């Protein structure tokens, strides 16, 4: 009954198919765009769409241009947090420095380093 057909789609063609100005989240009384699509294999209506994660994603809207990164010996080991607002990023940076005591933590706006736990009064 539930077929598990999978297909790689690009979001542009999905938008062209269902039309623009469609709610991403299900809205009461409105048929969700995923229900307007049918499976090419079994013809059932409805589908789930997952996005593939990419290494360095570009923000879809607004953007999370601030990153809290953890480093070991000059090598990026983890992005702990992304934030779209500077005040949130600063707060996250302060918390990350406390949580990861002794580790090098940076607050970056893309490639630009705004704070560095190893450098006093950076920024
Ligand atoms: Zn199917």
Image: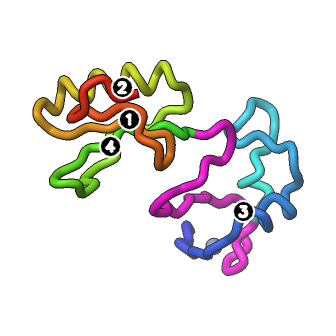
- Mark 4 and mark 3 lie on one chain; the one further toward the N terminus is 3
Q: Secondary structure at mark 1?
A: strand
Disc 1 + disc 4, Cβ < 8 Å: no
Left or right for 59, reference 29: left
Q: How many marks?
A: 4
The image position of residue 23, as x and y in percent, is: 76, 40
- The residue beneath circle 1 is 107
Task: Please report the residue visible at 77 percent of the width from the left and 51 percent of the height from the top.
Answer: 33
Q: Residues within 10 Å of mark 4 (few under 14, many from 20)?
A: many
Q: Main secondary structure of the magenta part?
A: loop
Disc 2 + disc 1, Cβ < 8 Å: yes
- Mark 4 and mark 2 lie on one chain; the one further toward the N terminus is 4
The CA distance from mark 3 to mark 2 is 32 Å
Disc 4 + disc 2, Cβ < 8 Å: no
The image position of residue 4, as x and y in percent, is: 53, 72
- The residue beneath circle 3 is 11
Q: Residue furthest left?
A: 102
Task: Please report the residue visible at 41 percent of the width from the left and 40 percent of the height from the top.
Answer: 113
- Mark 1 and mark 4 lie on one chain; the one further toward the N terminus is 4
The CA distance from mark 1 to mark 3 is 31 Å
- The residue beneath circle 2 is 92
Q: Which residues are magenta?
A: 38-63
- Mark 1 and mark 3 lie on one chain; the one further toward the N terminus is 3
- Mark 3 and mark 2 lie on one chain; the one further toward the N terminus is 3
Task: Please report the residue visible at 49 percent of the width from the left and 58 percent of the height from the top.
Answer: 56
Disc 3 + disc 2, Cβ < 8 Å: no
- In which quadrant of this rendering is ligand 1 seen? bottom right
The image position of residue 32, as x and y in percent, is: 75, 46
Q: Residues within 10 Å of mark 3 (few under 14, many from 20)?
A: few
């Amino acid at each position: 009954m539930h077929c598990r057909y999978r297909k790689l789609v690009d979001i542009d063609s999905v938008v062209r198919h269902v039309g623009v100005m469609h709610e991403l989240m299900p809205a009461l009384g409105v048929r969700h765009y995923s229900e307007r699509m049918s499976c090419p294999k079994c013809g059932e209506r409805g589908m789930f769409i997952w996005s593939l994660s990419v290494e360095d994603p570009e923000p879809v809207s607004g953007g999370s241009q601030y990153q809290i990164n953890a480093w070991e010996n000059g090598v990026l080991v983890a992005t702990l947090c992304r934030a779209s607002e500077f005040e949130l990023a600063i707060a996250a940076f302060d918390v990350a420095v406390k949580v990861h005591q002794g580790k090098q933590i940076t607050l970056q706006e893309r490639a630009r380093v705004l704070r560095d736990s190893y450098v006093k009064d950076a920024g």
